[in-house]
Image (cartoon, rainbow, N blue to C red):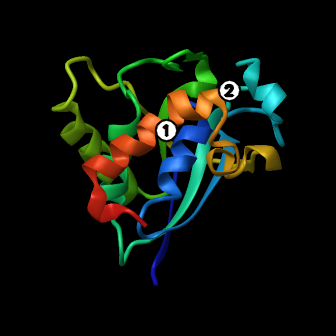
Amino acid sequence: MKKNRLVLGGGCFWCVEAVFLNVKGVISAQSGYTGGLRANPTYENICTGVTGHAEIVDIEYDSNIISLSELLDIFFLIHDPTTLNAQGADKGTQYRSVVYYETEEEKNIILSSIEKAQKNFVSKIVTEVSELGEVYPAEAYHQNYYELNSQQGYCQVVIAPKLQKFMTTFPNMLG
């Protein structure tokens, strides 16, 4: 097993986490916060939009099973990377499309993936690409949210279609 890390945000972390927890080769996917100025932010803090944090998912994966490029293909499928600081009704900088990197090699793969994904969108991709800073896990009630609350309205209306889109487009990547 070759463990690697990918930290990204594409709107509400519940949506992103729900998909990546079902990807073959993903070891873990934890909702959290990064990219802001305040240490140890809470959900209430970041929802104000003033801390600068994004809702993210911290993904650990086995690169012998799935590549960073393949994970990014999934990411660009399940959210709209052309909307600035918003995904659907979720609006604010905490919902921005963002991918974090730790090495120049990762940064180059991310930039190539954006270029590749751009062919699927009329509008310009506005996904932020930034160096990874401190990652703070979200509160326990945010973890594995879809699995624990799949009957709630938001889960059925917003998360389930993204999960279905992933499963239909990439059936060979289902974990």
Classify mark 1: residues with Cα within 10 Å, few (<14), some (14-19) or many (20+): some
Query: Relative to 144, does residue 34 appear above or below in the rendering?
Result: above
Residue ranking furthest to the bottom: 1
Is 142 located above or below residue 66 in the figure? above
For badge 2, the amino acid type reads Gly
- Category of crowding for the residue at label 2, using alpha-carbon neighbours closer than 10 angstroms: few (below 14), some (14–19), many (at least 20): some
Callout 1: SS: helix
Name the spot of residue 150 as percent of width and height, x first: 62, 42
User: Distance between the Cα atoms at labels 2 and 1?
Assistant: 28 Å
* Residue 104 quadrant: bottom left
**Foreground: 122 or 158?**
158
- Give left or right: position of 117 versus 4: left
Looking at the rendered image, the quarter that the C terminus falls into is: bottom left
Mark 2 lies on a secondary structure that is loop
Q: Which residue is mark 2?
A: 52
Residue 145 position, x and y percent, is: 68, 45
Q: Which residue is pictured at 39% across the width and 72% down the height?
A: 63
Position of 139 compared to 123: left or right?
Answer: right
* Pick the front one: 60 or 175: 175
Please state if 21 lies on the left or on the right of 75 as rendered: right
Q: Which residue is mark 1?
A: 160
Amino acid type, residue under disc 1 in the picture:
Ala
Residue at 57% from the left image edge and 26% from the top image edge: 95
Q: Position of residue 28 (x, y in %)?
A: 59, 64
- Ranked by sequence position, the earlier of labels 2 and 1 is 2
Please give the name of the residue rendered at 56% of the width and 48% of the height, measured from the top-left corner: 17
- In this rendering, which labeled residue sits more in front, label 2 or label 1? 1
